[in-house]
Image (spheres, coloured by chain):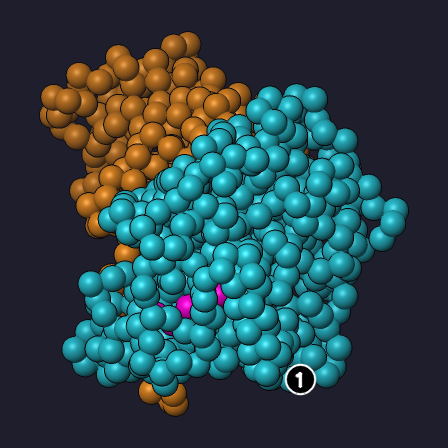
């Protein structure tokens, strides 16, 4: 029974995540940018823009300029998250890809640094006056949700093991539309329910910063307004009307 | 007005503690019916303002990717929270960039997102009430659209874009700001922001020719409406009579004279400023920019050069090509832009900043200077926000920082920098940009100048700085007003071309 419920939850959550994100990305892509507004100094070529965006996405360049504490904690959290997610690919691949096997130990300990990063970020939200001022209840809840995922995962890894063979069987089964039995295990249930909530809420929330940054005109535009005329469709219409 | 005093300098520039409500109810005057109607906005707050405002917001969200992405992407990380000069100076938490954005984001969430419709409290969503609307009017007119926050945001969220959208919504329901809207009315009716009519302008220019003749013995011309001139100079109207602006105008004229460039001003387009940007209204932005196109076509000029004005240079550099075709690279079928671009000489950048123009001559050794003429000055340079973060000069990113400094170093011997985290792309706004340069916002302007005044004081103490050069008409006007309040001489601020004017040699070489 629990297996069926989880199977349905994961199918629905994945569908919502994918459809929701595609819908959002499509909206961003279709909304015009009528004016050239890169934050200058900005690269003058597309190649330069790719580099700027890479620095922004991989190294959080702007945040580095802004605040070293926030930057450090963010890098710690996001970097660890990437490792942790990559490590989890082992539950979806059989045989496990070599590079996934290779990062397994790093992925395990990344769970700990991820938790530390999250706690640091939450501490900032709780104890720095101006960050507390701008925080909404959902800002706190997101951190709690992620902390919950990290803690339940770490407990399974280091304290109360679950039957990972069965877990893997369940997810491999899901990928072939074949529902297998999932271990009835409190930590696992909590862990998976929290992950499902994250997947569902992602496209409706501030987690949209992940796709959003790629569409940010202040970062993704090349600084070449004098060399090339930039005109959006609705602005061009004004010209055909009169003048 | 007399009771407005300068806030104390922070001994170490620490992040100030919050004082909620410090700037509540300290917004600008509301535009009158007459002012609003003159530029096509409803005269006063319309009855169905709520629905109209939400509809306008929806329209802007579909027309501007910036607004759409910026409304969604913020994670409240707080990177921007201590970066705004108005927050630093006023300590009002709603002047933190993220909090300023959230005034609108909370409404966006309520009306345009599912969680905001279902669980408003959870995600900080709010109904658009009259109180919220008043808050918008108050705090979106305490932003100078300087973009400093956007430098530090990990997603590049630019509060200026949000402020512009908010002002656009407010204007669309008849709740605009007096200062900006009145000035836009003047530029359409009279041709410039200061309301200087053509004959007065011609008089002023003739007077200037006499003054320069008296001072130098040389006939430096200030031509206007000359058909067939090579260069059309578009400059802020403050250059025609305000101090210290006028000294830079004299500097431009001397550079044109010394290089033998035929140039002209235009009575039709006697204003570089474009307050359409400040109120975020594309139609106004465009309409004001089209005056320059019209003047250029009528006078048949080959080049368009822009004088010392920060936001005007952002509009000219970044937007003119889009708005009016002043630029290059228009497509073959783009008749509108081609009409003008065929006329312009594309060996030069179109438009050209006066600093690019002068620096190019200096690099080619076409100008001679007596640098000792500026020896009485120990000079520093205040980067103006719109030039620094919304434009470029020259071929390389960052040319907007190098070129004005290079000019200063070419015409003067004593140049020092202010603290590095307050110059170049991290420069602090003067406190008067973005449509707040009005006496009804004087308290805001004085407090907003705090971070710049602190480092200026430091430069004065350490290096004896007695001249802060800048290339923005608003910076010049704002500093002239607030410098004395901070205990400085108002003459401490001046233009880069004022220094050029002092040192340039006009006689035969």
Q: Is residue A45 visible to us here? A: yes
| Chain of the residue where label 1 is placed in the rendered structure | B
Q: Is residue A61 left or right of residue A186?
A: left
Name above or below for residue B157 compared with residue B51.
above
> What residue is rendered at 55% in x and 74% in y?
B206
Percent position of residue B380, x then y? 52, 36
- Crowd rating for badge 1 (residues with CA inside 10 Å; few <14, some 14–19, many 20+): some
Chain B pictured colour: cyan
Name above or below for residue B357 compared with residue B82.
below
Name above or below for residue A72 compared with residue A237.
above
What residue occupies the far bottom of the structure in this picture?
A242
Q: Which residues are magenta?
A: B231-235
What residue occupies the far top of the structure in this picture?
A159
> What residue is rendered at 18% in x and 42% in y?
A176
Percent position of residue B114, x then y? 52, 57
User: Total of numbered circles in the picture?
Assistant: 1
Q: Tell which of A154 and B333 is nearer to you.
A: B333
Q: Is residue A139 left or right of residue A19?
A: right
Q: Is residue B360 visible to us here? A: no
Picture quadrant of residue A85: top left
Chain A pictured colour: orange
Q: Is residue B369 left or right of residue B339?
A: right
> What residue is rendered at 34% in x and 13% in y?
A109
Percent position of residue B266, x then y? 46, 77
Name above or below for residue B16 compared with residue A242.
above
> What residue is rendered at 42% in x and 49% in y?
B504
Percent position of residue B28, x then y? 74, 61
Residue marked by disc 1: B37
Which type of secondary structure does the marked residue at label 1 adopt?
Answer: helix
Predominant secondary structure, magenta span: strand
**Magenta segment includes B455:** no
């Amino acid at each position: 029974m629990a297996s069926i419920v989880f199977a349905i939850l994961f199918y629905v959550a994945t569908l919502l995540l994918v459809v929701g994100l595609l819908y959002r990305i499509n909206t961003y892509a279709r909304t015009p940018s009528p004016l050239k507004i890169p934050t200058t100094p900005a690269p003058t070529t597309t190649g330069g823009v790719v580099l700027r965006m890479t620095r922004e996405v991989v190294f959080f360049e702007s945040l580095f300029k802004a605040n070293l504490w926030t930057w450090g904690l963010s890098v710690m959290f996001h970097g660890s998250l990437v490792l942790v997610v990559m490590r989890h690919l082992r539950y979806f691949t059989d045989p496990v890809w070599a590079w996934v096997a290779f990062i397994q130990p790093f992925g395990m300990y990344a769970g700990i640094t991820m938790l530390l990063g999250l706690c640091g970020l939450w501490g900032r939200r709780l104890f720095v006056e101006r960050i507390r001022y701008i925080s909404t209840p959902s800002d706190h809840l997101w951190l709690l949700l992620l902390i919950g995922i990290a803690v339940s995962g770490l407990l399974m890894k280091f304290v109360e093991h679950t039957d990972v063979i069965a877990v893997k069987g369940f997810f491999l089964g899901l990928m072939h539309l074949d529902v297998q039995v999932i271990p009835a295990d409190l930590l696992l249930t909590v862990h998976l329910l929290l992950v499902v909530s994250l997947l569902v809420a992602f496209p409706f929330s501030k987690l949209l910063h992940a796709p959003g940054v790629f569409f940010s005109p202040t970062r993704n535009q090349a600084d070449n307004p004098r060399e090339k005329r930039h005109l959006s469709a609705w602005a061009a219409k004004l010209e055909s009307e009169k003048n | 007005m007399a009771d407005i005093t300068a806030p104390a300098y922070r001994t170490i520039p620490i992040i100030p503690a919050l004082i909620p409500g410090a700037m509540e109810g300290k917004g600008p005057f509301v535009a009158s019916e007459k002012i609003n109607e003159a530029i096509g906005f409803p005269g006063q707050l319309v009855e169905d303002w709520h629905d109209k405002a939400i509809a306008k917001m929806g329209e802007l969200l579909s027309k501007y990717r910036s607004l759409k992405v910026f409304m969604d992407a913020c994670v409240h990380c707080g990177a921007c929270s201590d970066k705004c000069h108005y927050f630093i100076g006023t300590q009002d938490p709603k002047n933190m960039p993220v909090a300023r954005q959230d005034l609108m984001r909370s409404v966006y969430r309520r009306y345009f997102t599912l969680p905001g419709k279902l669980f408003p409290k959870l995600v900080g969503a709010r109904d658009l009430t009259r109180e919220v609307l008043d808050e918008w009017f108050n705090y979106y007119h305490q932003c100078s659209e300087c973009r400093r926050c956007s430098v530090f945001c990990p997603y590049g969220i630019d509060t200026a874009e949000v402020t512009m959208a908010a002002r656009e919504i407010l204007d669309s329901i008849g709740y605009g700001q007096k200062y900006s809207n009145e000035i836009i009315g003047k530029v359409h009716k009279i041709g410039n922001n200061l309301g200087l009519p053509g004959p007065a302008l011609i008089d002023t220019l003739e007077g200037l020719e006499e003054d320069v003749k008296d001072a130098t013995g040389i006939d430096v011309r200030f031509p206007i409406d000359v058909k067939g001139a090579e260069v059309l100079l578009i400059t802020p109207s403050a250059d025609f009579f305000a101090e210290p602006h006028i000294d830079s105008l004299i500097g431009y004229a001397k550079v044109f004279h010394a290089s033998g460039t035929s140039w002209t001003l235009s009575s039709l387009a006697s204003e570089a400023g474009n307050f359409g940007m400040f109120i975020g209204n594309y139609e106004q932005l465009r309409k004001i920019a089209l005056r320059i196109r019209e003047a250029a076509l009528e006078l048949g000029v080959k080049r368009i050069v822009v004088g010392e004005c920060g936001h005007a240079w952002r509009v000219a550099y970044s937007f003119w090509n889009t708005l009016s075709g002043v630029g290059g690279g228009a497509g073959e079928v783009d008749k509108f832009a081609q009409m003008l671009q065929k006329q312009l000489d594309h060996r030069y950048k179109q438009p050209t900043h006066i600093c690019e123009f002068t620096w190019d001559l200096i690099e080619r050794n076409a100008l001679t200077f007596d640098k000792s003429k500026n020896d009485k000055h120990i000079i520093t340079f205040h980067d103006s926000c719109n030039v620094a973060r919304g434009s470029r000069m020259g071929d390389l990113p960052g040319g907007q920082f190098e070129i004005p400094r290079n000019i200063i170093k070419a015409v003067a011997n004593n140049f020092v920098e202010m603290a590095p985290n307050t110059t170049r792309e991290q420069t602090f706004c003067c406190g008067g940009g973005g449509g707040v340069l009005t006496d009804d916002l004087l308290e805001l302007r004085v407090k907003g100048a705090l971070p710049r005044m602190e480092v200026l004081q430091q430069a004065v103490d350490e290096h004896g700085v007695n001249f802060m050069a800048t290339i923005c008409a608003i910076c010049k006007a704002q500093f002239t007003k607030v410098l004395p309040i901070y205990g400085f001489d108002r003459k401490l601020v001046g233009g880069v071309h004022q220094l050029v004017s002092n040192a340039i040699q006009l006689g035969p070489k």
